[in-house]
Amino acid sequence: MTLSGTSGAAADYSIPTGFPARHMGPTATSSQTMLDALGYESLSALVEAAVPSSIRQGAPLNLPPALSESATLEALRRYASQNQVKTQMIGQGFYGSHTPSVILRNVLENPAWYTAYTPYQPEISQGRLEALLNYQTMVADLTGLDIANASLLDEASAVAEAILLMRRANKKLAQAKVVVDADIFPQTRAVIAGRAEAVGIELEFVDLAADGLPEGEICGVVLQQPGNSGAVRDQRELISQAKERGALVTVAADLLALTLITPPGEQGADIAVGSSQRFGVPLFFGGPHAAFMAVCSGLQRQLPGRLVGVSKDAEGRPSYRLALQTREQHIRREKATSNICTAQALLAVAASMYGVYHGPEGLAQIARRVHTQARALAEVLGGAGHQLVSASFFDTVQVRMPDAEAAEVVLAKAEGAGINLRRVDAATIGVSTDETTTTREMYLLAYAFGLVEKPSQAAELYDRVEFEGEYAFVDELIRESEYMTHPVFHAVRSETQMMRYLRKLADRDLALDRTMIPLGSCTMKLNAATEMEAISWPEFAGIHPYAPEHQTAGWRALIEDLQNKLAEVTGYAAVSIQPNAGSQGEYAGLLAIRQYHLANDDAARDICLIPASAHGTNASSAVLAGLQVAVVATAEDGTIDLADLDAKIGAHPDRIAAIMITYPSTHGVYESDVREVCKRVHDAGGQVYIDGANLNALVGLAQPGEFGGDVSHLNLHKTFCIPHGGGGPGVGPVAVAEHLVEFLPGSPAAASLSDAPAPVTSTAYGSAGVLPISWAYLAMMGAEGLTSATAHALLSANYIAARLKDYYPTLYTGENGLVAHECILDLRELTKASGITAEDVCKRLIDYGFHAPTLAFPVAGTLMVEPTESEDIAEIERFIEAMIAVHAEIQQVIDGEHDAANSPLKHAPHPAAVVTADAWDRAYTRQQAAYPVPGLNGAGFAPDKYFPPVSRIDGAHGDRNLVCSCPAPEAFEVR
């Protein structure tokens, strides 16, 4: 069949058999029902009417034929078989760890956890908010600081965020240099150097242990504990000196080491960052892993990323919510603390549960075992005459060999024995022990270093080892303070307890496994089980990001194929998969544009034009890339105001670097003049950045690289089925035209090459561990399936808009009165007449068993609805019926049957504890409160009724009384 085109026979966009029919909710019959309601004879007629002919691609996607689910798994097995699974003792911030099976099965492989959305609606997110609060409490306790956030993207970018935080907070010395200890991971050095250069921060790398602090004013200092060399040092004196000179201090710390070592906060540091990967999260070839940031009191309003806080609900029950959201980019735009939107919530949950499962005693036991193994290795190596880089360490022993040839012999013998070691430089070898290290590896290491002729002979060698002192670092560094004292870290030890705890938390929440999540601009589509299956295979999950290339052929082949397919889908020349979130893809794309202008001696081009309706991350990403923001107004019909665009270009001649546009626009429409917008910016010497947040309305129909884009980022956690995970992981690949290819992110491994582009994350392939999900989706859908999915996403959105138009008008429409893949429902007139707000409607929808649509974005007083192609007509009708019923309740207020304050909408949501209480003094019945639509859509509402665990949460109280660690159990007692 012909898939698409501006001429010739039109496509019918029917759903192919096989996996596409499983992925998509509509059937041929239900699709026709929706088309009849819209007045179109066929889906092709609807697409022709909705999508401007000026942007339509002229040929179908050039992709291989779709694979079956079984064939896809076979193909993934072939890729996996090309990777070599070794015992990974490379370290460098990535360590082997045992993921408890109860956590693997009940969190990482459980759709109740991985299909959840970011907890902006806290009443239906209490389970994952508690898990994230556990994470924050654990991190704050281990680092010895007052407050921690709910995760960042990776350790290297977390250090970059800390540098920016020090600059914001240390206003008197904001323009002074930041001093970075030379003993920092090389990937961190590469990332922060690029970030600092973009925004004009001076970094000075100094061997602080040898040379101390340099002369001159200092804004901040960055240390690492343990260092890149493995060295553990008492940093109190250095930190004290830095603070006496007015500097703030950040320590990149290892959480497991902090169970034994005096934490950064107790040594005087202001900020601690790092990765929680070794708390039960697989290596995943470099990610996704949850980074962290903890700060001392006074810096909490400067924190980047999400922050979970404790508040109370309408009845005074303790409850959780995202705190201090006014810091975030969606509100403050270019003035936000960070451009981070999606972080690593799912991995933070897994790490927190690792802490809950093991408790402080278990973590300390693991740490002591890891440390003892490293000590034993150091003793036998030192006893044999090998030169150790540092005699003070936690888990990493570095050895200076006589020459490069000697180092190569050890590395080769170790690899032959199944162990990967780190080549620090030509003649230096690094060995990092971890939770997975056994006696077998210890014997094999002795063999690899030539201490014994046979591994079995090493037993006698280690038996002779005698330690002096308790640890391989000074007594002054031994941790004496308690940590993780909250009961949650002491109450769960058996697998039965953990299984029930995870189930209890999951049952509090609404995720995609229970209901449609109609969030506009978020594309909450199916995350199919077959897509998810391969990510936990050892051949994928057990590979270190810095393993030798000949061991990672399968990973690199899969990634190359995925990048090529994404380039075909988008119409660009090349794609980099490195950015580990949409925000990082934005940053990488804008940085490529900035570097392009600099390479062309066009440094004056420093202004990024951003429409008023743009995602908040756009503006904050532009600032991080060293650009200034000029906002372009929105016309009355929701399109870019071309007159204002011309005015902005005219006001800044020769300074236009780029424009960032989202297409279809955040108003949910295809703008027919997008080519004209691109032309005007190109004529002004600028580049066009097309935000790929809404790519689910384009795949197979139009390619941004063909209708004017120079660069786009994509969201694999939207369009290409990586699950949202309650706020991460995400992947934000950046796609570019030919002239920008050389400016794509570089590899951290190439940090020594001064002319290499800066990396944006800790590893070359970012969150590689979840890439098999998107690869499988593309493989199973094929060109026809992908294009059909796009068409059905348009169909469902237009059907909802049409069915609800008499109740909630659609704010913006495009050609022929149609929307794209989402629609904005305008509640502003209803609010004026009734006092019932869009937020009230969101809370009331919980009582109907729905996650709310997107609230107040991009227009205050509205709801943005995106059903995706995965929802069947029964679920769509259930949502429509709920929205109509809510409108009837609003009408009751308008008609005077209820006053707004006493209506079910203002009191929503209604937990079971409220509707079953002895007292009931409300103006409506318990039945209306809990079961507002009997047998909702005839499916039988009562048996599967979802009750939220709390009533409406008082957000302002939580911000005024900021508590961001686990409350005492007594706080939950019934009063």
Image (cartoon, helix red, strand yellow):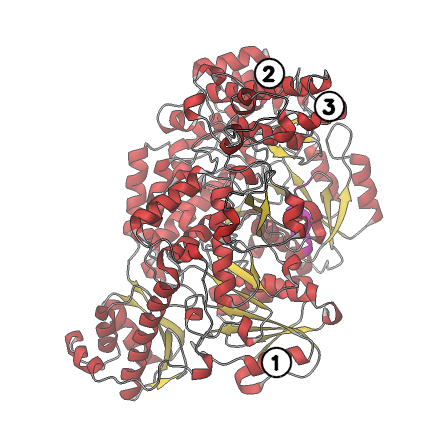
Q: Give the quadrant of the N terminus.
A: top left
Q: Quadrant of residue 56?
A: top right
Q: Which residues are magenta?
A: 614-623
Q: Main secondary structure of the magenta part?
A: helix
Of labels 3 and 1, earlier in sequence is: 1
Could you say whether the residue bearing mark 2 is in a helix, strand or loop? helix
Q: Is residue 577 left or right of residue 324?
A: left
Query: From mark 2 to mark 3, how far is it between C-alphas?
Result: 22 Å
- Residue, disc 1: 240
Q: Quick one: label 2, few (<14), some, or many (20+) residues within 10 Å?
A: some
- Nearest the viewer among 827 and 778 is 827
Q: x%, y% of residue 224? A: 51, 73
Q: Residues within 10 Å of mark 3 (few under 14, many from 20)?
A: some
Q: What is the three-letter code of the residue carrying label 1?
A: Ser
> Is 273 contained in the magenta span?
no
Query: Which quadrant of the structure image shows residue 784?
Result: top left
Real-space Cα distance between discs 3 and 1? 59 Å
Select label 3 or label 1 by which is in front: 3
Position in image of residue 311 (x %, y %): 59, 47
Q: In the displayed structure, would residue 782 be above or below residue 680?
A: above
Identify the residue at horizontal 62%, vertical 45% (top origin): 710
Q: Tell me: residue 726, above or below residue 229.
A: above
Does the residue at mark 2 contact the one at mark 1 (Cβ under 8 Å)? no
**In the rendering, at what x and y percent does residue 70 appear?**
29, 35
Apparent side of residue 340 relative to residue 101 in the rendered image (left or right): right
Name the residue that disc number 2 marks.
803
